[in-house]
Amino acid sequence: MGWAWFTDPDYWASKLAFQRMLAALYLVAFLVAANQFRALLGARGLLPIPKFVARVPFRRAPSIFQLYYSDTFFASVAWIGVAVSAVLVLGLTDSASLWVSLVVWAVPWVLYQSIVNVGQIWYSFGWESLLLETGFLAIFLGPADMAAPVPVLWLLLWVLFRLEFGAGMIKLRGDRCWRDLTCLYYHHETQPMPGPLSWYFHHLPKPLHKAEVLASHFTQLIVPFALFAPQPAAGIAALIMIVTQLWLVISGNFSWLNFLTITIAVSALDSHLLPFTPPPLTEPPLWFRVLVLAVTALVLVLSYRPARNLISRSQLMNYSFDRLHLVNTYGAFGSITKTRHEVIIEATEEPELTPDTVWHEYEFKGKPGNLRRWPRQFAPYHLRLDWLMWFASLSSQYSDSWLQPLAEKLLAADRATLKLLRRDPFDGRRPTYLRARLFRYRFTTPQEHRETGDWWVREPVGRALKAGRLGPDGTAVAAE
């Protein structure tokens, strides 16, 4: 049996670019974990990991934190992930042996797997599974002096196909506005975390919004099939996806989803589009070839349910069919919210509540609050609490487990929690009472923006949490 087909030097440059970009996203993911875990998942966090692992067995949530947990240990894991990712970004293992390459790339995958599997609702987003699925395949690409294994390249194309086609199908099966091309009349305004240009995108002429939807349907429902065509067609399809993802990058904050999609698409570019001459390349040993084929067979077997899901009328979105997130199903925004609501948390230092009580708002880093504050760019960095606050505005089912504990942490002026916010109106002092109100937000019109300087207009529509104070046992007690 000949093995000439097993590696392809035409993908040497794209393999290196893919590895560098993926390592950079790993670095961001571990940095997010290191900076935010204590308030969200720490021993005294909103959803403590020790309580989670006490009720969820290892087989359902494989993680090194099932064996031992402390905040110091979690911080060490996260910073080790940052360090290893930085080593990979800098290419310090490029000249290492094949065994070293396998081990080094496996480290961030194992560590991030451990974080995601105990991350609960804070780590319930599709890009977590996408990073793990892609990171698993990256383990088997080999060092820089070896050409890319063709089976792994095909598996990356399969990931990209499911990601794009799944997103397209969930739209066709979902909200009617995707079929009548009007979803982007609303989406730029109502998306979880608008970016600096979202206001401008929202005010594009409606025919351009329809053109955006058509372009999305073309890229997600037709272009993915060209990924499996001969070059240069496959590379051109990948370039179309890259351009589309860059459009999404500048129009909103979707963590590293768009950046990771671009990274996977880069792996489909061969020497036609990345004309770099590789150095002399080594041939992989037989044991590695057998290992890659075994991994390929495993992925194909595990692909049955995700593939069936793509054509199912009851298509699942962002779902993992195995505990290690090896092969997943993806999709986003099958339905579009037409009206934006925001949960605004306020507190006061006054000793008693009266009709004249003055309330002060807590300001978050990314989610809308202050009407005059221009939305910021945070992606690929992920503000997990800000994103969940958007879900909390949709339904209490998304916040039942953590919104009340958040209120208690703010009433206690918990330092770790306050670090997740942009501004604490009390400068670290404990307020006496806290409440959360629901507001309807919309972008200002161009005329309103010229006259007021505001980016948003809002009006109160209800209550998310009753006004309360901190009781003797550290839990919130309703005051009205």
Image (cartoon, rainbow, N blue to C red):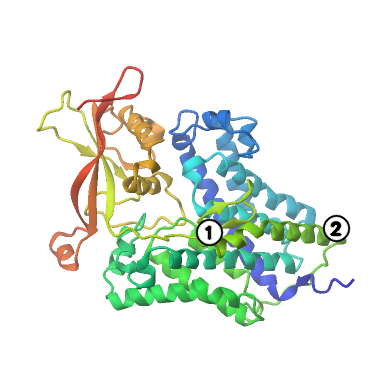
Look at the numbered disc 2 and give the secondary structure of its residue: helix
* Front residue (pair 471, 427): 471
- Describe residue 327's horizontal placement relative to residue 171 as left or right: right
Q: Is residue 91 among the parts visible in the rendering?
A: no
Where 442 falls versus 358 (above or below)?
below
Residue at figure coordinates x 50%, y 45% from the top left: 123
451 or 224: nearer the eye? 224
Q: On the rendered image, what quadrant is the C terminus found in?
A: top left
Report the amino acid beneath label 2: Trp
For disc 2, the marked residue is 287
Q: Residue furthest left?
A: 356
| Rendering coords of residue 286 (x, y %) | 87, 61
Q: Position of residue 31 (x, y in %)?
A: 51, 46
Instruction: Name the amino acid, label 1.
Output: Tyr
**Residue 87 sits above or below residue 69 on the image:** below
Q: Which residue is mark 1?
A: 330
Considering depth in this image, is 172 or 120 the residue closer to the camera?
172
